[in-house]
Amino acid sequence: MAKRKKATAAETDTYRHAADRANNPPAALASEGVTPPAPPASYAYSPRRDPVLRSDPDGEHVRLLQIARQRALTNDEADRLQALLADREPWLEWAGKREDHARGRFQTDPVALHVHERLSAEAILACAKREDVQRDLFADPELEYREAVQFYKHKIDWSNRLILGDSLTVMSSLAEREGLEGKVQMIYLDPPYGIKFGSNFQPEVGKRDVTDRPDDLTREAEQVRAYRDTWHLGVHSYLAYLRDRLIVARRLLADTGSVFVQISDENLHRVRQVMDEAFGAGNSLSIIPFKTTSNLGADVLSAGADYLLWYAKDRDQARVRLLHVPRTLADDKGGRYTRLELADGERRVMDSDERGGQGNVPDNAKVYRHDNLTSQRPRGAGDLAAYDLHGIRFSPGRGTFKTDEEGLTRLADAERLGYPTRNSLAYVRFHDDFPHTVLSGVWTDTQTGAFTDDKLYSVQTNAKVIERCLLMTTDPGDLVLDPTCGSGTTGFVAEQWGRRWITIDTSRVAVALARQRILTAKFPLYRLRPATPEEQAARPHGTWLRGPKGEKEPHTFEYATVPHVTLGSIARNTHLNPIFDRHRPILEDRLRDVNAALGEVSDALRAKLAAKLAEKMQSEGLRSTTDADRRRWLLPGTTKQQIADAFAGRSKLKAKHVKAEADAVPPDGRFEHWHVPFDADPDWPQSLTGAVDAYRAAWRAKMDQVNACIAEHAESETLVDKPEEVRTGVRVSGPFTVEAVQPAEYDLTGDDDPGSGQFAGAPEELPDGFDPADGPPPAVQVRTVTPRRAMDAANAEAYLDTMLSRLRSGGVQFLGNRSMIFSRLDRLGGETTGLHAEGRWSEADGEDADPDGPPTVGVMVGPQYGSVTAKMVEEVIRPAQRRYEDLVIAAFSFDGAAQAVIDEATNPLLNIHAAHIRPDANPAMDGLLKEGGKDTTSQQLFTVFGKPRTDVLRSDGDTFTAVMEGMDLYDPKTGEVASTGAEKVAAWFLDCDYDGRTFCVSQAFFPDRDAWGKLAKALKGAVDPDAFAALSGKVSLPFEAGQHGRCAVKVIDPRGNEVMRVHELPHELPKGA
């Protein structure tokens, strides 16, 4: 077989970041390594208020008032009460807040985060193109074993992160364990709006319409706990939930960073006060209403908007990039741009049709307005007292001109001065001097509709909203955090714009949706350039993108810019002077020719031309005449009497009109530059017509050069939302990981010391001379010293008693309607590592022959919240295999690595059974399902499930294919396991060379045939369409055995749960189709 070519990036590209991250424990390696101890992190509640303000959070004034009802206050008490009532700061009170303030702080455990998956769209596409998949496409550090088990000790290349877990503990871990305190540039928080359980969570991947019906409610224990923590006291606990997360978020933010909280009007006022306390009222930057399509059920008006509360960590240091949007005449709601300059230089007021902004402006005409030329600063010594223009003296009034005399002259020569009245000198600002305007703080174009992408999640935010927040506050390479992942919109937007991202959610459904959305996305490819020294100096601690060829030197986007012509940029533009000097003598010569041609104009012609002016004023109205009309018909030498004779007998024309028009005649019988007509009258002598045409041509030539020079040397605005796009490449997402919180384990010893209990003691040292290539030495047990966020002992006791009681009475249900019933099940003490009970069992229709005999079954009960991990399984197998014939691991969920450990357990004397606990049995679900009266003690609460039905077949030569035929799908509503086909899964993944540490997704399959649609279309010709079609099927693309000689298959069910199976790849595998 011909050797396949190496993978290249000719057709696909991605961005890599010149940043690093800690080496988190791989899920399957966690039990073999050392996680450094980390004490609980403390976060102070003290709000950052202006020091001159005061408050009485402890209620001392209430106590003093109560005393006053019983007896007279002492002088000191009276003075104290008076001070409290006089200086008391407004204080948002909720249940438990005063007690929290009395404690002054709260604590959270910075849990370890385990890496479960590494994903790379480039690797999947390389496999589809039949190219070798390089491990570095996953940003896999491939550390030697000795370093790989030293968790959080080594820096590895950055990869983005999708984390399953509670946002509070995850953010604390990021700050305390990984050193990300002060490293996050933007946080986007979209907390739940309402208090209904069913309205907060989506139960399945494809089920976006959520209701309060029991069948639609989530059964994920982590989400139930999140709901309980958030809403168990209604809005009181909701505000406490937000406050705690905002306090930790503030610690993560860089000094230049910003946080955005999305909220509806229901709790807007309360949440703003909480943010004032967490960030300081002075750090509020804006409240941004944005239009939505949702109707939140207001009784009076339809609530068609949500709100963004934008706060900076430090307003004075905050990084803000203003966004600009194109501006049209239709956007001129104030009606300020009402004048036109035509190509020949004529200036006039726009008529009603032209003001409509519908394309009625004449060709080559420029819209302008008169703008203020003076400032309010009082005139001082050296300031210009007056300026002469066109024979008129203008004063700045009580203020001063915005530029000096040289600047004013330059503006005049550039035709940028005008006078709407003879007493007012103004700056001429053209509409296209800056054809953009700063985006306002009210966003009306953010609703979703028929022409936007379909929603993936029940409560999904429009990407445009997050995109604007990100672009206003971050630069390429910056880190963005979203503690409320949902469908992954923040991660998606951050990936598109070259930012690093971390996104967190308690829902497996949300993680599954976000993973698919980001992995299969096609993004624009933006051109990169080296960051300038000035840019690097402005961000001395910033992170940057790597170069297009992987260069580690800082790179950023090449952005489009637009010129921004201002009064100052013209007044200071000395490059205009040579143009003025070059064209001044030419225009003077043309002016002499025009004045010379006046000699051929007779008095009779002057009278005839004046009569044309009179006729227009009479027939079309007094205001119909323009400056161009007067220049054309009131030639130098026209007398007042000629005008009076022309106006005689016309009812609308009075003596005052005669005087006004006579004053408009150029004095001294000659033209000045500001008098020369813009066009000719048919009755003019040919010589005058030719001279005026020649003058206007010379004037146009000058102005074309002037305008080009102004544009070339104008200030410019960078459009941070318009990077230069490279059309020749297809960009996909960079490498990212799926991680999860290590759940708490039960320590029933009653000892809260992190260094004691189930995993106490320091880790044993690896022996000298250890060769990492040999794997871990069998004689050494490396024990974790990770502190556990131990449950309160009483709660742990109650939970375990409840679970064991139900297990004792109901037994365990197996596939095929087989049941095992316990004849005896006894609690074990806390000293037995990982095991919680032991006993004996028998078939449901049989009897135990020796009920008093030695125990044959060990039982481990998984966490009330969170999944059973590989580490938990490995540590419970060790004692169980020496004592029992069967081991039951009962839990609400299992992570994939744990199932792989169970699958690979080879002890022939120990049968390991993974049993799902029906979620309804979780005490946390009490009162949420509206199913009162059910007796959960007698239902099928513990059900053993099987492996995913997968197989590996050898194809021609040395290649293999994996086949996914289905899985045993657990229904949490009934507690039953049903064997389903491949069409029922939400996704399945293949790691072609599983290393036993982390699942690297080299092939990803989604039943949605459109999942890879955009990439398939973009890569048409580079990737066989049949390869993309296979990525929605149940048979993998062919692959070769890697250096580890095994592959792994992971299957995801519609509720986001996963099952995993590892296959060895020996040479004797049977051939298959």
Image (tube, rainbow, N blue to C red):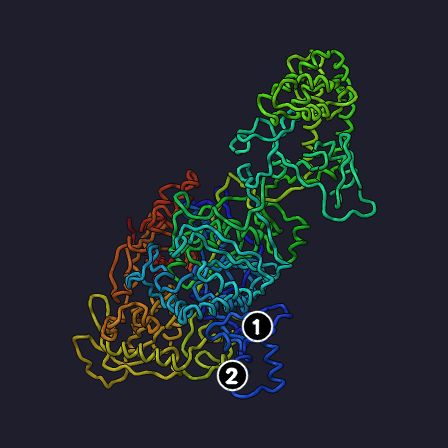
Residue 1063 visible in the displayed image: no
Residue most toward the right?
A: 381
In terms of depth relative to the viewer, which is nearer, 345 or 159? Answer: 345
- 228 to 1005, vertically: above or below: below
Quadrant of residue 656 within the rendered picture: top right
- Answer with left or right where residue 124 lies relative to residue 344: left
Q: Can you tell which of label 2 and label 1 is closer to the viewer?
A: 2
Q: Is residue 454 left or right of residue 760?
A: left
- Say whether disc 2 or disc 1 marks the residue closer to the N-terminus: 1
Question: Which residue has dot 1 on it?
Answer: 46
Identified by mark 2, the residue type is Gln
Disc 2 target residue = 66
Q: Is residue 796 left or right of residue 853?
A: right
Instruction: State the residue at coordinates (76%, 24%).
Output: 672
Percent x, y for residue 681?
65, 16
Image x and y of residue 1007, in percent:
33, 50
| Number of marks in picture | 2
Frontmost residue, 720 versus 700: 700
Foreground: 562 or 185? 562
Quadrant occupied by the N terminus: top left
Estimate the x, y position of residue 89 in percent, counting from the top left: 58, 71
Given the current orientation, which residue lies at the most extreme left position? 845
Using the image, tell me which numbered label, if any, was put on residue 855.
none
User: In the image, is residue 864 above or below residue 10?
Assistant: below
